[in-house]
Structures are given as structure tokens and as C-alpha cells.
């Protein structure tokens, strides 16, 4: 049987001619940090102080003794790297084993009978990229870094939310595999469901030793009680398992997520000796992508097991700019938070990585659909060698690795490159040179069709389906909505109903405790040096300020107020888009918020900041991504009430709609009985006598259905006549809670809009169960805080913010 020996110990990193202890998996930056040789690049402006790290060559080494590679009854010993970052020469005992130039694929080298000093010598990613650029010629991109010339995590080179920390190292596990006769080189399970019966078509490729070339081999497979075996003809075999009535795997909110162990073994039939085995968990489900044309344009609707899905999605970037630090536990925490925010789809963005198997395992269990980009983003990518061969090898490697996961439902060719070709002045500068189209419309769809025909492929995001339409046409396919954040007010999200919004978002600073940790000793201000360094977007603070100023008086010299208002505007902006687009299901079939997470502490579009703290946006996502949502949508004819039911059951509810004065007076009221069928939306106009008087700055509209509420203020906040907020605060220990867990009750005596308790002001680990709340006069809100250090009423009151009169 194959024997596996992990090589995680005994590595060193050469620095200034001396060996340093090295952690594998890891990278140069984390090893230098551990040795105290560089400052933490996440703090202050230290990022600039470590720029030199990414511009040097680095060597990792360890001894590979005779005992490590001794055959010990095995005919072959392979050295296997699951991830090398990026351009490297591997030598053993001074003799070259091979060269690599791709972070995103696995490598295997025959080291049978060889031993000595093992070296992995990394050249600078900048030097490798420059070498390739000289071979292929210049290609445009959106950042002044050469990421399109090297198959490496693009955001290592910086992004509009990420630092420039260009890594090198053995970033995924490395091991020895000892085997005889033959091994399982590749296993591809194609899982389908037809007429309630499941089929698993298992395609197996084997590799043989010289001694095993003529040995008779058999492959055996089993799943859910079904078993089958077949003889290996040459170096491959196909087995078909049939499961009569498997439980179906569903996205969260649509059903359960049963998983079945698929086991494959390779046997020498001459001796009945097991040679190798493979095991993965699979799920039985079908997925389609409906791109049918209709009276609205061209659709883009995911269909799972025949159920049409409004995708409640988030975009995912690497959770750390040093991805080797992301543990399975961290993946699970972040993805559990994603599910608890109401999301049912995660898009892995094309400037990052193909994530670790632990990511997809967690999505399988949580019912999170995975949209996987191939790794191309915001640049023209040369299609010449040596890149073309690397792209094909990388795509084949990762399609095969990831295809067992039922959560994976869509392959996507690239992020914004087809759009960029048309709109970012690439056509003229390229003058006919290759730029990636051949990957997205040729190579990648062929690979998916060959290796994983059970899943749909789309050429890019955004993409209208063909060059017959603009790549980012909202009426056709996927759409990225960035004009609003870049140039407009968030209310303008309501001006269009795209078929599928694959990216949109609004920035806000991270939590105060995150800023204090990341910017130690700095007097915080929107334009203080550290704040500006941790703002990577082009004119990011200008756009933040303009977003605030459209609705509020921009606070001068009051950082706490600015911080609160920026977070309020982020939450409101994203909510405005989602509520509008959800209310137009099934014309619009999904929203994918940019973004759920961060890779370091930064002002960004994230809902969870770089230290893992939840922004108000996170809590707002929980509201607007809930199965049932009530929203009041402005229109030229007056407010429209939308009752959205994405649950599996009909929703029978009594609605109360009130036209209110800021002093709490109910000026008009209507009670409605509404029934909304499962997975549908009910829309109706609000009666004219209920609509707030447009000439009044003191009227607003409230709709309630049980615990759900929608409010509509007809004027921007700085034009609305809010009363001075007046509320009482009481603090008691939470029932059965330990120290630091308290219940806060806020009793409003006036209208209190967008009340927010910033729990991290009460302790860096404190969290609150509630985000923004609007209270009517006389109403109470109960807020639960966990992990607070300060729990006095004065401290709690100081951590409370709300909208104030202009």
C-alpha cells in the first residue's frame, strides 16, 4: 500500500547567508516575522519597510536522508509539493529535480533512491514576471504591478483593498509518497441525478512503475452501499455506481446537505494486494445555469435540483495576504459567519487562489454554493508560452481537485477582463496582441467540458453571453455595478434591474478596535497617515466622504462621528441595492456583495474586517438576506411595498402600514392581509393617503409584519427634521451569563434612527448581537453584548451612536 510521509519539519530559510528556522507550509514573510527580522507589515506603515522581501531570491532547504527515500519494499518514491510560490528550482544533492513557475498547481518529482540536501530556490516574483514580459510583450492592467505575467495570487501585488506583500515559499504541504506497481494518479467523479436515481461515473487514471507495467490491476469503488469493480485497461478505467434513491444535497435554506463517502481503491489482482486508495465526500445534486432569452434580455439563473435560486451571495478574497496562515478552523469560522449572514453563495474571486480543500469541505457542510473563478483578474493576460502551458496545467489540476465537492456549482473564466477589453482602452493598445480571450472563450470551456461536464461554465464576470452585447450590459447575463460607488448616490442602485449583480458594494472603515491595533499610537483622523495608508482605493476617502456628505453634514474634527456615519452609509447602500433587486425576482436572479472578508486591516467594502470583527454591514446582510423581507421602495408614482418570501412555505401575514410624524403621531394607518407564495415576491403600491407629504420634513412611512419592519424616509437625512435623539439606557447582566456579558435596553422617547452600539469600544473582544436599529417614540430595543470589559451604563452610552439633526 502507498505510504505517505509528511515533510513539515526540519526546514530552514537562508537569510544573509545564515539559516533561519522555517515553517512549512508558510512563506518568507511569516518566517522573517517569527525570527523578529521584519516588523509586522499589517501595523502602521510597515508594509513599506518590507517591500525588499518580495524583490529578493530565497532558498528553503532540509536534509532528505537515505532513510527518507529508501525503498523499504517500495519500488518508487515521489516528492510531492501541493503548492510552491512561485518560480523555483528544486535540487536534491546538487542535482536539479525540476523547475516551477506556478503557485496554483501541484508538482511531483521521482526521487527514488536519491538523498542529500533538498533545496527549493525561489527567484523573485518580480524577476520572473519581467522575464515573461520580455518574452510576450507588454499588456495593460489596472494596477502598476506585473501580476499578469506570473501564475501567482494576483493580489500579492496589492489591490484596492490589499497591501503589496509579494510572497515566496512552500505555501502548501510537501510530502514523500512511496509506492509500488501502480498508484491512483487521478480520480474524477461525475455525479448526476436522473429520475431520483443517483449516478457516479468514476474516471480513474493510474501511473505504473516499470515493474508494474504488465501487472493486472483492478479498481474498486463504493458509495452509499453501491459497489463496483473493473479491470484497468492500460492506464485508465471507468466505473459506474448507481444509487437508487439518494438523499439530495441542497443549498442552505432549500433542504439538507447529506454527504456520502465515495471510496476508490486500486488492487493488484495477481496478489489481491491493495496498492492505493482515494476517498472524498460527495453529494447528489444537479445544477444548471438558465441563460434563456426573454422579454427582459438574457437571464442568468442558477437551478439546483430543478429549483430556481435567487442567489444571496458574497464575494470572497483570500482571508489573509499570507494564505498559508489560514487554518481549517479559520475557514470554518468565516464561512459559518457567511452562512449566518444569510448568504447561500460564495464567489471565489479571480485575483486570489483556488482555496484549500478545507474551504470547500465547509461549504459542502454549510450548504454554501461556490462560484469558482479561474484565476484571472483586471488585466490583459498573454496567451503565449510559457504562460499558456501553465494555464492549462493549472486549470486541469484544479478542476480535478475540486470537482468532488457538491457545493461547487459554477466555473467562471475571469474577473472583468472581457469588460476591460471593451471599456478600459485595451483594444487600441493591444493592437491585435493576445490578451486572454482565447483562455476564456476557448481553452477553459474546453477543459471544463472534457473534465467536469456536470457543471456550467461562464466566460467571465461580468459577461453578457456574447460580443453581440456589451460585456457589462445589465440586461444580459452578469453585471458589475460600480458606477454608484465611484460616482453616484446609493439611491441610484434603484435605477436598473440587472439580471444578476455579481459585484457591487460600498466602503467603510474597519471597527475602532481594529484601527487601534493596526495603527498603534496614532491620533485617528480620516486623513491621518496610517488611515490613508490603510486605504488602498483610488480616491477612497474622497468617495467615502462624498457618500456621507450626500446624506449628512460631514463632521469636521470628530473622527468617532465620521467613523459611525461611514459605516451607516455602507450598510444603507448595500441594503438599498439588495432590497431593490430582490424585490424584482425573478427578473433579477442574484446579488453578490463585494465583499464578505478582508486580508488585512483596511478601509474596504468588507462586512467582516481584517481582524474578524463584524461591521454594521454584516448585521444588515442578516436582515436583507433573510428568507422573508419587507421593504418600501420609492418610485415616481409613490412608495411601493414589496413582501419577499424566499422560504419554502407560503407566507400569510398581517401588514400594518403607517404614515408617521417625527413626534410619534400616526397620521394614517392601514392593515393588510397578505399571502405570498413560496419563493415569490408580492408588490403593491402604497395608498396615496399613506404616502408621506413630500413638502414635509417630518413625515415618514413605516410597515410592520410581525418582527419585520421597513421604513421609508422621503428626504435625505440632512434635509429631514429629526428631533434631538432622547433615549434611556439600562444595563443588566445577561441571564446566566459570565462577566462581560450584559443586556442593554434602550428606551426611545423620540424617533431614534440607525441606533448602533459599537461593542468593541467596551473591549477589543466585545461583540453585540445587533446592528443598526430604528426606534419609534416609546419603543425599546434589547441588545446583547458578550465579552465586554467596560459594562457600566456611562461606558455603554458612550458606545451608542445614532443619526442626529443636521
Image (cartoon, grey):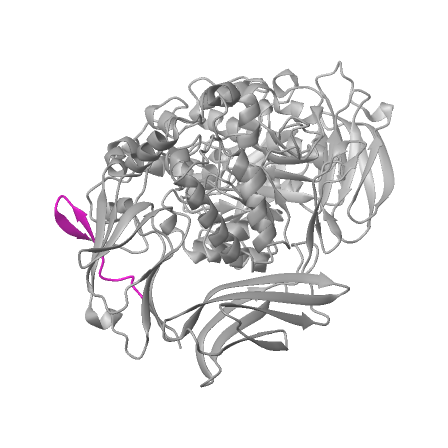
558 over 586 or under it: above or below: above
Instruction: Tell me if residue 18 is in the magenta stretch.
Output: yes
Q: Position of residue 607 (x, y in %)?
A: 52, 39
Location of residue 772 (image quadrant):
top right
Q: Position of residue 690 (x, y in %)?
A: 83, 26
Q: Residue furthest front?
A: 214
Q: Position of residue 84 (x, y in %)?
A: 34, 50
Q: Residue furthest bottom?
A: 271
Residue at left offset 46%, top offset 33% = 381
Q: Is 445 displayed left or right of 648 in the figure?
A: left
In the picture, which quadrant includes the C terminus? top right
Residues drawn in magenta: 6-20
Instruction: Tell me if residue 423 is in the magenta stretch.
Output: no
188 over 228 or under it: above or below: above
Location of residue 356 (image quadrant):
bottom left
Residue 631 visible within the image: yes
Q: Position of residue 132 (x, y in %)?
A: 35, 35
- Choose between 371 and 331: the one closer to the eye: 371
- Choose between 36 and 102: the one closer to the eye: 102
Q: Is 91 displayed left or right of 792 in the figure?
A: left
Q: Residue furthest top?
A: 695
In the picture, which quadrant includes the N terminus? bottom left
Residue 662 visible within the image: no
Residue at left offset 52%, top offset 39% = 439
99 over 473 or under it: above or below: below
Residue at left offset 67%, top offset 45% = 626
- Choose between 350 and 132: the one closer to the eye: 132
Amino acid at each position: 500500500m502507498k505510504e505517505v510521509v509528511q515533510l513539515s519539519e526540519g526546514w530552514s530559510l537562508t537569510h544573509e547567508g545564515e539559516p533561519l528556522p522555517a515553517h512549512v507550509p508558510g512563506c518568507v514573510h511569516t518566517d522573517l516575522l517569527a525570527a523578529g527580522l521584519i516588523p509586522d507589515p499589517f501595523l502602521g506603515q510597515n508594509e513599506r519597510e518590507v517591500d525588499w522581501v518580495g524583490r529578493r531570491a530565497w532558498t528553503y532547504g532540509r536534509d532528505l536522508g537515505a532513510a527518507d527515500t529508501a525503498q523499504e519494499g517500495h519500488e518508487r518514491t515521489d516528492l510531492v509539493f501541493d503548492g510552491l510560490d512561485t518560480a523555483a528550482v528544486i535540487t536534491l544533492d546538487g542535482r536539479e529535480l525540476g523547475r516551477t513557475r506556478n503557485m496554483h498547481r501541484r508538482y511531483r518529482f521521482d526521487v527514488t533512491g536519491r538523498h542529500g540536501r533538498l533545496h527549493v530556490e525561489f527567484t523573485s516574483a518580480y524577476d520572473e514576471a519581467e522575464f515573461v514580459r520580455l518574452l510576450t510583450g507588454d499588456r495593460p492592467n489596472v494596477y502598476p504591478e506585473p501580476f499578469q505575467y506570473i501564475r501567482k495570487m494576483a493580489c500579492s501585488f496589492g489591490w484596492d483593498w490589499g497591501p503589496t506583500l509579494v510572497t515566496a515559499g512552500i505555501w502548501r504541504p510537501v510530502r514523500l509518497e512511496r509506492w509500488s506497481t501502480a498508484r491512483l494518479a487521478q480520480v474524477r467523479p461525475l455525479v448526476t441525478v436522473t429520475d431520483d436515481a443517483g449516478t457516479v461515473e468514476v474516471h480513474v487514471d493510474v501511473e505504473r512503475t516499470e515493474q508494474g507495467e504488465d501487472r493486472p490491476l483492478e479498481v474498486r469503488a463504493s458509495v452509499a452501499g453501491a459497489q463496483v469493480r473493473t479491470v484497468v485497461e492500460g492506464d485508465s478505467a471507468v466505473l459506474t455506481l448507481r444509487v437508487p434513491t439518494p438523499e439530495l444535497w441542497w443549498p442552505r435554506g432549500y433542504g439538507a446537505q447529506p454527504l456520502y463517502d465515495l471510496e476508490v481503491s486500486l488492487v493488484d489482482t495477481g496478489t489481491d494486494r491493495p496498492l492505493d486508495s482515494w476517498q472524498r465526500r460527495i453529494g447528489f445534486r444537479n445544477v444548471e445555469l438558465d441563460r434563456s432569452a426573454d422579454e427582459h434580455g438574457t437571464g442568468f439563473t442558477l437551478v439546483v435540483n430543478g429549483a430556481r435560486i435567487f442567489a444571496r451571495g458574497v464575494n470572497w478574497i483570500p482571508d489573509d495576504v499570507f494564505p498559508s496562515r489560514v487554518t481549517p478552523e479559520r475557514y470554518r469560522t468565516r464561512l459559518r459567519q457567511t452562512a449566518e449572514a444569510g448568504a447561500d453563495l460564495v464567489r471565489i474571486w479571480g485575483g486570489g487562489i483556488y482555496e484549500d480543500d478545507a474551504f470547500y469541505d465547509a461549504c459542502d457542510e454549510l450548504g454554501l454554493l461556490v462560484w469558482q473563478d479561474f484565476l484571472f483578474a483586471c488585466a490583459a493576460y498573454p496567451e503565449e508560452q510559457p504562460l499558456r502551458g501553465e494555464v492549462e496545467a493549472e486549470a486541469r489540476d484544479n478542476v480535478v481537485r475540486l470537482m468532488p465537492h457538491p457545493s461547487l456549482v459554477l466555473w467562471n473564466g475571469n474577473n472583468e477582463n472581457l469588460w476591460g477589453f471593451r471599456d478600459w482602452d485595451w483594444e487600441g493598445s493591444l493592437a491585435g496582441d493576445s490578451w486572454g480571450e482565447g483562455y476564456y472563450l476557448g481553452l477553459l470551456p474546453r477543459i471544463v467540458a472534457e473534465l467536469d461536464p456536470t457543471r456550467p461554465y461562464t466566460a467571465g464576470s461580468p459577461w453578457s453571453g456574447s460580443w453581440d452585447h456589451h460585456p457589462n450590459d445589465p440586461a444580459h447575463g452578469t453585471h458589475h455595478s460600480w458606477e454608484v460607488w465611484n460616482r453616484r448616490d446609493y439611491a441610484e442602485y434603484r435605477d436598473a434591474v440587472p439580471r444578476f449583480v455579481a459585484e457591487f458594494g460600498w466602503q467603510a472603515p474597519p471597527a475602532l478596535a481594529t484601527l487601534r491595533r493596526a495603527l498603534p499610537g496614532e491620533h485617528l483622523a480620516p486623513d491621518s497617515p496610517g488611515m490613508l495608508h490603510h486605504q488602498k482605493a483610488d480616491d477612497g476617502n474622497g468617495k467615502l466622504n462624498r457618500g456621507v456628505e450626500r446624506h449628512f453634514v460631514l463632521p469636521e474634527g470628530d473622527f468617532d462621528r465620521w467613523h459611525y456615519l461611514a459605516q451607516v452609509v455602507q450598510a444603507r447602500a448595500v441594503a438599498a441595492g439588495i432590497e431593490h433587486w430582490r424585490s424584482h425576482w425573478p427578473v433579477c436572479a442574484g446579488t453578490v456583495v463585494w465583499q464578505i472578508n478582508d486580508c488585512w486591516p483596511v478601509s474596504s467594502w468588507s462586512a467582516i474586517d481584517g481582524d474578524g470583527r463584524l461591521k454594521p454591514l454584516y448585521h444588515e446582510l442578516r436582515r436583507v438576506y433573510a428568507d422573508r423581507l419587507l421593504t418600501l421602495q420609492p418610485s415616481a408614482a409613490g412608495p411601493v411595498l414589496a413582501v419577499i418570501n424566499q422560504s419554502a412555505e407560503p407566507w400569510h401575514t398581517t401588514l400594518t402600514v403607517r404614515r408617521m410624524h417625527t413626534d410619534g403621531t400616526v397620521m394614517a394607518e392601514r392593515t393588510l392581509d397578505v399571502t405570498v407564495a413560496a419563493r415569490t415576491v408580492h408588490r403593491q403600491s402604497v395608498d396615496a393617503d399613506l404616502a408621506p407629504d413630500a413638502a414635509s420634513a417630518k413625515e415618514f412611512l413605516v410597515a410592520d409584519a410581525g418582527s419585520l419592519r421597513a421604513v421609508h424616509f422621503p428626504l435625505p437625512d440632512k434635509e429631514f427634521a429629526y428631533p434631538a435623539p432622547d433615549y434611556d439606557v439600562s444595563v443588566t447582566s445577561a441571564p446566566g451569563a459570565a462577566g462581560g456579558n450584559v443586556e442593554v435596553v434602550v428606551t426611545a422617547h423620540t424617533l431614534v434612527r440607525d441606533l448602533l452600539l459599537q461593542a468593541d469600544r467596551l473591549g477589543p473582544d466585545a461583540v453585540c448581537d445587533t446592528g443598526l436599529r430604528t426606534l419609534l417614540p416609546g419603543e425599546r430595543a434589547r441588545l446583547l453584548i458578550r465579552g465586554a470589559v467596560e459594562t457600566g451604563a456611562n461606558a455603554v452610552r458612550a458606545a451608542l451612536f445614532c443619526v442626529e439633526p443636521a
